[in-house]
């Protein structure tokens, strides 16, 4: 009886030294997959929300930079995002160095959003010498590169500086269409 007990305890020790059984490993893998299935959609949703918040912030920066450009250079609103950008100081009326270079240079994309800036309402009457003529108004838009993946909401702003949004992700085609959308409070 003692010999049988010794053999059994040796077998148990030997089995314990071999590691995990296949069933134990499968259970661990199944638990990891369940956790991943819960976490990944939340991670994607939070990334999309972060992209949307960044788009609002960047559009607010473009609006503020447009007003700063008007005040600094007395040339109306700038003609393009490239004029608001620029390389390194010193700033000029054609390279103002007021916004992030990734937004100012083609393809004008950042954080999953496409930025477009258009001068509206005609050129200013008398631009300063050497400056690209500015505009009396502008329309700045930020649209998701891939609706449902990088963002769900598009944003726009015109000369009052109020940021409006469209939950369909469509880009506003004019200042009037932008102003007709709900405003961010």
Image (cartoon, helix red, strand yellow):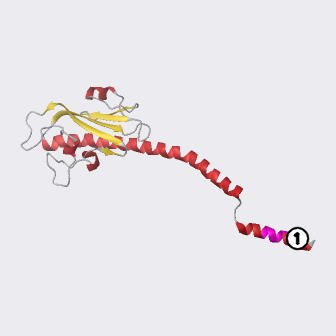
Residue 59 appears left or right of 133: right
Q: The residue tagged with tag 1: helix, strand or loop?
A: helix
Residue 139 drawn at (x, y percent): 25, 34
Query: What quarter of the picture does the N terminus occupy?
Result: bottom right
Residue 70 drawn at (x, y percent): 17, 40
Residue at mark 1: 5
Query: What quarter of the picture does the C terminus occupy?
Result: top left
Q: Residue at x 60, y 49 (%)?
A: 33
Which secondary structure is most common in the magenta stretch?
Answer: helix
Q: Residue at x 27, y 38 (%)?
A: 116
> Which sits in the foreground, 57 or 171?
171
Q: Is 9 contained in the magenta span? A: yes
- Mark 1 Cα within 10 Å, few/some/many (few <14, many 20+)? few
The image quarter containing residue 159 is top left
Q: Which residues are magenta?
A: 8-13
> Vertically, is 90 above or below 104?
below
Residue 18 drawn at (x, y percent): 71, 67
The image quarter containing residue 20 is bottom right
Q: Is 108 contained in the magenta span? A: no
Q: Is residue 162 visible?
A: no
């Amino acid at each position: 009886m003692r010999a049988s007990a010794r053999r059994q305890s040796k077998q148990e020790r030997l089995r314990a030294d071999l590691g995990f059984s296949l069933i134990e490993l499968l259970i661990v893998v199944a638990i990891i997959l369940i956790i991943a299935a819960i976490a990944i959609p939340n991670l994607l949703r939070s990334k999309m929300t972060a992209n949307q918040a960044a788009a609002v912030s960047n559009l607010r920066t473009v609006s503020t930079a447009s007003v700063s450009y008007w005040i600094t250079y007395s040339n109306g609103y700038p003609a393009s995002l490239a004029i608001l950008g620029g390389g390194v100081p010193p700033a000029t009326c054609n390279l103002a160095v007021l916004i992030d270079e990734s937004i100012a240079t083609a393809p004008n994309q950042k954080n999953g959003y496409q930025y477009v800036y258009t001068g509206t309402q005609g050129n200013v009457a008398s631009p300063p010498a050497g400056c690209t003529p500015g505009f009396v108004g502008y329309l700045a838009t930020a649209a998701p590169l891939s609706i449902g993946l990088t963002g769900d909401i598009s944003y726009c702003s015109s000369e009052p500086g109020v940021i409006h949004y469209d939950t369909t992700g469509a880009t506003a085609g004019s200042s009037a269409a932008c102003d007709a959308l709900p405003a961010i409070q």
